[in-house]
Amino acid sequence: MTHDDEAALVERAAQDPAAFATLYDRYVERIYGYVARQVEDKTVAQDITAATFEKALRHIGRYRPSETGLAPWLYTIARHEIAQHYRRGRFAAPWRRRDGDEEEPTAPGSREGRPIESLLLAGERDGALHAALRRLGEADRDLLTLRFLEELPTEDVAAILGCSRANVYVRLHRALARLRGQLERADLAKEMPR
Amino acid sequence: MSIHRDREWEERLETGAEDDELLALAARLRRAGAATRATPSLAFQRQLRRDLLSQYPVAPRRGANVWRWVGSLAAVALLAVVIGLMWFSISSSGRLSFGGAANGQAETAIASLPDGSIYLEMHGYNSTLEALAPGEMLSLNGRWRIPANVANGADLTAFLQLRAEAGAVVAQADGPLTSEYIETRNGREAWWFLLSLALPEDLPPGEYLLVTGLVGADGQRLPVFDQQVGDEIVIGPVTIGQTQDADPKVTVLAVSPTSASSTNDNSGVDSASPTNRLVDYSVNGAVVTETTTTDGSETQTTYLLVPGMTATVRSRWSLATPSIGLAAFVQLLDQDNQVIAQGDAPLEPAVDGADQAPYAATIPITLPAEMPPVPTSL
């Protein structure tokens, strides 16, 4: 969702705390929700969210509303912070699986296989879907997360991933097909006698 | 698929159609996303908002002319001089006494300079502040962000006070800070703490106020920033209800009831799990240093307390179940079992002796300046 007054708020935000506070209030829940899907605990999600907004505040003067929306800009910063977090490997640990899928735990520091959503989200209602999503490659998972779990518009996803809108559609089609394949494989595995 | 059909698929995707297997899968993902979205706590949102706004003014836009930079540098230099002068004047006389009333002069002096102040990042309570009952423990977990040029967190003590409406302190906990460097926070020093406040059993139901702050090695409160600079931060109102039978939300370890003049009964247990055990402890500072072993042997120890000074009780614990988020406390009781002083500290994995006592807590306890010359119990 975009807001008509966003460009004006951004313009003022470099000097006016109230303007930045308004932008913060609009986006903090979305950014936190996105980060919490990607990391292993609440404290890390809070740290990364804080780092994202601190960076946004520091660089708000460089942001050009005419080039991209504020949401994709913030998501881009958050993605970078998440990548930094996993690169540092400070908190990385093999993540716990809840659904009995057969994937091996990945090495600390690897982004592959990291939790697609936080372990805090005890209310997961579609375990098979999330398990299939976790088995996808990082690029597919990232794309599907941004477009569908986060419900970002396609043009925002294109801005975040640095590709064209048409390319996003092509990639979405392929990623959904691969996700469907993972779900089918999981169904077959369940049906096979042990 | 042809280009024409691709575009059709794209349009149907945008409209949320589900008449295709992949489009249905996309819709399923959207629903799963909505069902599993995490939301940040209000306390975190408010704290981060406060932190961010305290960082103004931010860097000017690119393209600003050189005079703006020169002006900014001059302003920063001037600001640094002013901060230094103010800090010096406050350090010498203007700060507040621990537990004392607010000092308006100190607030005014620092209020316009939040960048030189100390901030609190609160990570949460053990329970909601609206649903507490007498006898329960109220734990506060958070980080202080202390600029290294202002103070060394290792020299500071965090305090947590519960006050009645009239301002009287009805419960208090103090504890040390643990260094925690956080790269994502502009390289600032962060100091973690966990304080647990034992609500008195006879606390009348009603509205109270929870405040926290920092005290220096000299016993003086430090200026802290929360919207404006003061000597404490108001966490919020606390509603104390009637005593409930429900289990407390945090397991609380009770320090062994070893008396200064009685026999150790090796009963260092926690109230919720009888198999947790205090293995040993030692008391240093403000007393004659003694180490008492409670593991099987009976020892009688007498301490000589020095009023007004801070003692440190180091305790090591064996827990039935490995746990995090627990706190240990030590209380100094008078002959009527009234609490004279109390200290709390988080229980952390022990560095040494981890086989028998995998957890340890270092608990500072500040003794009142006025103490009657009567036997007391630790």
Image (cartoon, coloured by chain):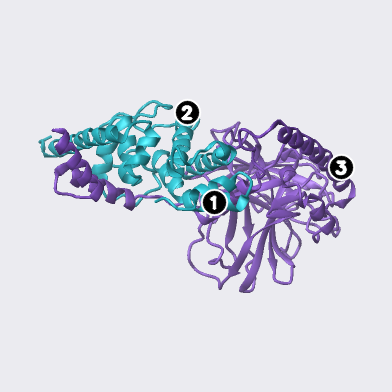
Chain colours: A cyan, B purple
Q: From where the camera sits, is residue B267 visible? A: no
Between the C-alphas of marks 1 and 3, the distance is 34 Å
Q: What numbered label is drawn on residue A135?
A: none
Judge whether B233 appears above or below B60 on screen. below
Mark 1 belongs to which subunit?
Answer: B
Mark 3 belongs to which subunit?
Answer: B
Give, as a three-letter code, the residue at label 1.
Phe
Q: Is residue B81 left or right of residue B237?
A: right
Secondary element at image label 3: helix
Q: Residue at x 71, y 31 (%)?
A: B66
Q: Do the dots labelled 2 and 1 sit on one chain? A: no
Residue A52 drawn at (x, y percent) = 52, 40
Q: Quadrant of the C terminus of chain A?
A: top left
Mark 2 belongs to which subunit?
Answer: A
According to the picture, the residue beneath numbered tag 2 turns out to be A89
- Residue B74, image quadrant: top right
- The count of marks equals 3
Residue B250 vs residue B178, the one in the foreground: B178
Residue B214 drawn at (x, y percent) = 73, 49
Between the C-alphas of marks 3 and 2, the distance is 43 Å
Give, as a three-letter code, the residue at label 3.
Leu
Q: Residue at x 37, y 48 (%)?
A: A121
Contact (Cβ within 8 Å) of mark 3 with mark 2: no
According to the picture, the residue beneath numbered tag 1 turns out to be B44
Q: Do the dots labelled 1 and 3 sit on one chain? A: yes
According to the picture, the residue beneath numbered tag 3 turns out to be B85
Q: Residues within 10 Å of mark 1 (few under 14, many from 20)?
A: some
Q: Residues within 10 Å of mark 3 (few under 14, many from 20)?
A: few
Residue B172 drawn at (x, y percent) = 70, 58
Residue A35 drawn at (x, y percent) = 43, 42
